[in-house]
């Protein structure tokens, strides 16, 4: 399935890279947290601030200044939060189904004035992309092995 938009051709490599990174991060979420102290916060290269909940039950805080007009499920656990050079990303787990999260994100983001630029659904995951003013939001959803949904949300400035 191919989806195009007038701004997407130049943006497509970034979308693909971010989507792949988010999918790999979500798929390896449990393994990545082994041996990490609970709610560890580290300084990564490039002045990135990364927070991760190690035990799979606690939640870390959203990055400082995370936009309030971005859809996040009401019932959620924030597994990781990244704040890096104008880009913020959170990985969440919610008990809601992927289909319900996808539909709610799409409906509420458009209701909040965001323009949907990409909508993709497949057997193993879904992606949504929105733009508003000079900001862009990507949602990557996959089914969680324990039930519910793993959701990666990336927010960044755009042209």
Image (cartoon, rainbow, N blue to C red):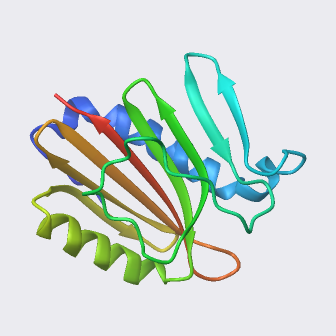
Residue 95, given in percent of the width and then of the height, sits at: 56, 82
Between 20 and 88, the one nearer to me in the picture: 88
Q: What residue do we see at 42% from left, 70% from top?
A: 122
Residue 1, given in percent of the width and then of the height, sits at: 30, 60
Between 23 and 41, the one nearer to me in the picture: 41
Task: Classify residue 9 as left or right of residue 86.
Answer: left
Q: What residue do we see at 48% from left, 43% from top?
A: 63
Looking at the image, is 138 positioned above or below residue 109?
Answer: above
Q: Is residue 4 visible?
A: no
Q: Is residue 67 visible?
A: yes
> Residue 56 lies in what quarter of the image?
bottom right
Residue 41, given in percent of the width and then of the height, sits at: 70, 37
Between 29 and 88, the one nearer to me in the picture: 88
Q: Which residue is farthest right?
A: 35
Looking at the image, is 43 positioned above or below residue 134?
Answer: above
> Residue 105 lies in what quarter of the image?
bottom left
Q: What residue do we see at 20% from left, 75% from top?
A: 107
Tally of numbered discs? 0
Residue 137, given in percent of the width and then of the height, sits at: 30, 48
Task: Classify residue 11 as left or right of residue 153.
Answer: left
Q: Quadrant of the C terminus?
A: top left
Q: What residue do we see at 21% from left, 35% from top?
A: 9
> Residue 68 lies in what quarter of the image?
bottom left
């Amino acid at each position: 399935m191919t989806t195009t938009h007038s701004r997407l051709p130049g943006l497509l490599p970034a979308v693909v890279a971010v989507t792949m990174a988010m999918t790999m991060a979500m798929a390896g979420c449990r393994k990545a947290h082994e041996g990490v102290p609970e709610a560890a916060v580290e300084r990564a290269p490039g002045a990135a601030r990364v927070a991760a909940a190690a035990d799979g039950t606690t939640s870390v805080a959203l990055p400082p200044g995370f936009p309030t007009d971005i859809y996040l499920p009401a019932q959620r656990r924030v597994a990781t939060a990244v704040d890096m050079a104008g880009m913020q990303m959170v990985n969440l787990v919610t008990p809601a189904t992927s289909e319900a999260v996808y539909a709610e994100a799409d409906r509420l983001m458009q209701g909040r004035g965001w323009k949907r630029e990409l909508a993709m659904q497949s057997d193993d995951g879904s992606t949504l992309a929105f733009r508003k003013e000079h900001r862009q939001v990507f949602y990557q959803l996959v089914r969680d092995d324990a039930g519910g949904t793993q959701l990666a949300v990336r927010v960044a400035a755009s042209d």
